[in-house]
Image: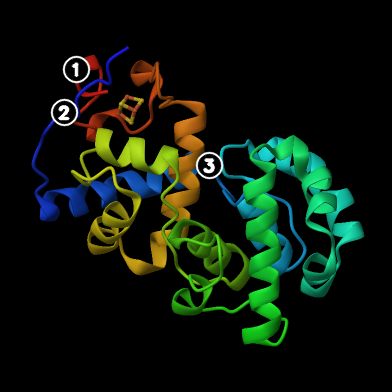
């Protein structure tokens, strides 16, 4: 089936920022305590879980990480393991070869360049093999408590439906959102929008009649804009 062409619209940043100001308190009320779904006990575990979560559900990742984190307790444990062993241990997360390589190479770099500790800056995190801005933002926000915008599939879809950005490219979208969302709200915006995308504004069938933010959504009840 041919890909549906992206609907074009132009974002008025001032107006988009005003809408964000209206939407944020509603989403926070709908999803109190919204936080990352991946389970982890330290920055390294979150980094590994985030790499595993690509093209995989958080639920499945959470099913395999307790045994993984019991077996591999440090970057050194991942670095010295046989690649085939890691592949077997993470197989059910899918794309296990690429993910095993990313995890092992990231851990080797953490040991060589960062004395075995996961770095806590964007510039350093993206030097790790297999780590892009999306993974880095997840680690910065959830392991280090820094404001960060996590542009996953839900954030991309909802940001376009809410006409907060014309961009679908996650990096361009992240920079667009950073301009219109107060920095202190970057992380909570991401967590609540992800939950709203899972619960109400789903990809194929957004439930506009029951959406708490529909009055601020230019795409409400308009399938042409989904
Ligand atoms: S009104 Fe509809 S399209 Fe807009 S955010 Fe809500 S569910 Fe999504």
Question: Within 10 Å of the Cα at label 2, are there few (<14), some (14-19), or many (20+) other Cα atoms?
Answer: few
Depth check, mark 3 against mark 2: the one in front is 2
Residue, disc 2? 7
Question: Within 10 Å of the Cα at label 3, are there few (<14), some (14-19), or many (20+) other Cα atoms?
Answer: some
Residue 173 in view of the camera = yes
Helix, strand, or loop for circle 1? helix
Question: Within 10 Å of the Cα at label 1, are there few (<14), some (14-19), or many (20+) other Cα atoms?
Answer: few
Q: Which numbered marker is on residue 224?
A: 1
Q: Is residue 180 left or right of residue 199?
A: left
Residue, disc 3? 31
Q: Is residue 223 left or right of residue 194?
A: left
**Residue 209: image location, x then y, percent:** 35, 16
Question: Which quarter holds ligand 1?
Answer: top left
Residue visible at 45% across and 33% down? 197
Quarter of the figure with the N terminus = top left
86 or 49: nearer the viewer: 86
């Amino acid at each position: 089936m041919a890909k549906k062409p992206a609907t074009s619209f132009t974002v008025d940043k001032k107006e988009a920022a005003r809408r964000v100001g209206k939407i944020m308190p509603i989403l926070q009320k709908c999803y109190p305590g919204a936080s990352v779904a991946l389970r982890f006990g330290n920055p390294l575990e979150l980094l590994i879980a985030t790499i595993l979560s690509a093209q995989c559900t958080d639920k499945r990742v959470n099913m395999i990480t307790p045994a993984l984190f019991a077996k591999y307790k440090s970057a050194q444990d991942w670095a010295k393991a046989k690649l085939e062993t890691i592949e077997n241990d993470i197989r059910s997360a899918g794309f296990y070869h690429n993910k095993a390589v990313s995890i092992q190479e990231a851990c080797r770099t953490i040991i060589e360049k960062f004395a075995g500790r996961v770095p806590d800056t964007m510039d350093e995190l993206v030097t790790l093999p297999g780590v892009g801005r999306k993974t880095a933002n997840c680690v910065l926000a959830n392991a280090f408590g820094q404001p960060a915008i996590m542009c996953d599939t839900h954030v991309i879809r909802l940001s376009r439906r809410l006409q907060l950005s014309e961009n679908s490219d996650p990096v361009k979208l992240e920079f667009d959102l950073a301009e219109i969302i107060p920095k202190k709200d970057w992380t909570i915006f991401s967590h609540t929008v992800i939950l709203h995308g899972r619960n109400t504004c789903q990809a194929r069938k957004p439930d506009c009649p029951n959406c708490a933010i529909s009055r601020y959504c230019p795409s409400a009840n308009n399938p042409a804009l989904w």
